[in-house]
Amino acid sequence: MDDMSDRQTPKPMFIGGQWTLAQDGDAIPVVSPADGRVFASVSRGKAHEVDQAVKAAQRALEGAWGRLDGVERGRVMLRIAEKVLQNAEELAQLEARDTGKPISTARNDLAVLARYFEFYGGAADKVHGQVVPFQNGYTVTVLREPHGVTAHIIPWNYPAQMLGRTLAPSLAMGNATVLKPAEDTSLSALKFAELATEAGLPEGALNIVTGLGEEAGAALASHPGINFLTFTGSNEVGTLVQQAAARNAVKCVLELGGKSPQIVFADADLDRALPIIVRAIIQNAGQTCTAGSRLLVERKIYDDFVGRVATRFRDVRVGTPEMDLDCGPVMNPAQLQRVTRYVENAKAQGIVLLAEGQIAPGVPEGGYYVRPALFGPVPRANALAQEEVFGPVLAALPFEDEADAIALANGTDYGLLAAVWTESGGRQQRVSKAVRCGQVFINCYGAGGGVELPFGGVKRSGHGREKGFLALEEMSSTKTLVQFHG
Ligand code: NAP
Ligand code: MG
């Protein structure tokens, strides 16, 4: 991977079944977050390549891909899952190098990618329409049909998982897809395209245009030939792509950020909660939309429990992918600056830094390593209690009672996940129902994975649902047939 030729010749994109360089030959360097060094490059596709990809997808719908029925699509997808599993170690090594994440996290991500293709491959022939009772003399059937060409713009935090999450339900429903991976992490997607082709995915069903967000991404979101859009990423860009989609009357699913609360009551099983709560903010160096980034604790146990979290935090260790510790570096210099700024601002405002994790000795210079940090008590209106850091920074806040816990949990612009920790069954139900978000975990937490579980946000965390069977509904539209037969 590290030879000069790999760095000099950009990896081509995958358009209409062909490996294609950018028309102008432009490329983007690929940097390892573990040491800050360039180790490859990918093509910098722009509007021209996006247009080629959308047209290839349109042709696929008219061609071999469009002619497959659900059973056949499912078989191709199951073969893709098998290819991913057979090549899982190579893919995981590539993903770990590209993202900096610990190798065991990358291995898990690849297992999840395979799961998406298994789950939706198995579902491809099981999405039923409806028969609607209507007036005498009529039969009304509601069919489920693909949207047509679906566009998918994904971020860098879980490149392989995101690819599976967004592409698999769309392909299962018979759409043809165009993917724009994040500029920082395109390698696993390109390798995936190779495997999907070997598995027999017809040309044009999957097209990958690598490039910059403001070039390839913007061109894809605004292309009049797309019929549906999914976007996962920041609120700022989410607003832009929704505006672009609106101009073409294209529906979109937005998966944006979060500030998910861990709500811990005094009667909770604290021994069980403790490692799960620490893991939920450390995982992927906190660069997880569903990171449990707010620790809300009932006041009477606040000092004691937060003290125990602090003790664990001091043992958290950050290292290279190969060291395979609790977390790796953050993604890029911008992320490093962002996380450092939140930490420095909080300290300058006098918020108590309760504990910090350790960067392992021997990590390469030039890597983007930050020490995980626990702050508390954080004032409720403070940026650390309100804004998504997207890094390994946990904000602890005390609450008084159940009503206060609910108000505090709902007191941000976001609504993605929440966890409720209590042994009281009544309280589990009351709090779960009162918290405004897309998933609630009771005495557990599930950032990432869970391909079966409908997922998505409310409020500024976005709209639409991915994962589970609901994604198949998102990725299709209905057609109502009204037949008069007397
Ligand atoms: P981002 O800057 O919004 O990027 C996401 C994707 O959009 C990338 O592929 C990016 O390309 C592309 N993009 C950038 N500008 C664009 C434009 N003008 N038009 C079209 N596409 C454009 O987000 P990020 O920094 O990669 O990820 C961090 C944020 O994503 C966090 O807020 C996090 O919470 C959120 N996130 C949410 C979820 C979820 O499931 N809800 C999952 C992961 C992340 P480039 O890579 O070239 O910039
Ligand atoms: Mg960018």
Image: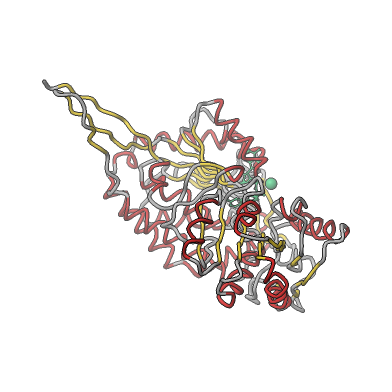
Q: Which residue is drawn at the image coordinates 17% and 21% (left, top)?
A: 484
Question: Closest to the observer: 75 or 444?
Answer: 444
Coloring basis for residues: secondary structure
Q: Which residue is drawn at the image coordinates 22% and 29% (left, top)?
A: 140
Relative to residue 285, is residue 49 depicted above or below? above
In the rendered structure, the answer to whether residue 169 lies left or right of residue 101 reads left
Q: Which residue is drawn at the image coordinates 72% and 78% (left, top)?
A: 311
Relative to residue 302, is residue 288 depicted above or below? above
The answer to whether residue 50 shows anywhere in this view is yes
Q: Quadrant of residue 302?
A: bottom right
Quadrant where the N terminus sits is: bottom right
Q: Position of residue 317 (x, y in %)?
A: 70, 75
Q: Position of residue 111 (x, y in %)?
A: 46, 65
Relative to residue 365, is residue 391 depicted above or below? above
Question: Closest to the observer: 232 or 444?
Answer: 444
Question: Closest to the observer: 118 or 57?
Answer: 118
The answer to whether residue 10 shows anywhere in this view is no
Q: In the orientation shown, which residue stands out farthest toward the left?
A: 486
Relative to residue 137, is residue 330 depicted above or below? below
Q: Position of residue 18 (x, y in %)?
A: 47, 45
Please give the count of numbered marks on the rendered protein.
0
Q: Position of residue 455 (x, y in %)?
A: 49, 51
Q: Quadrant of residue 475?
A: top left
Quadrant where the C terminus sits is: top left
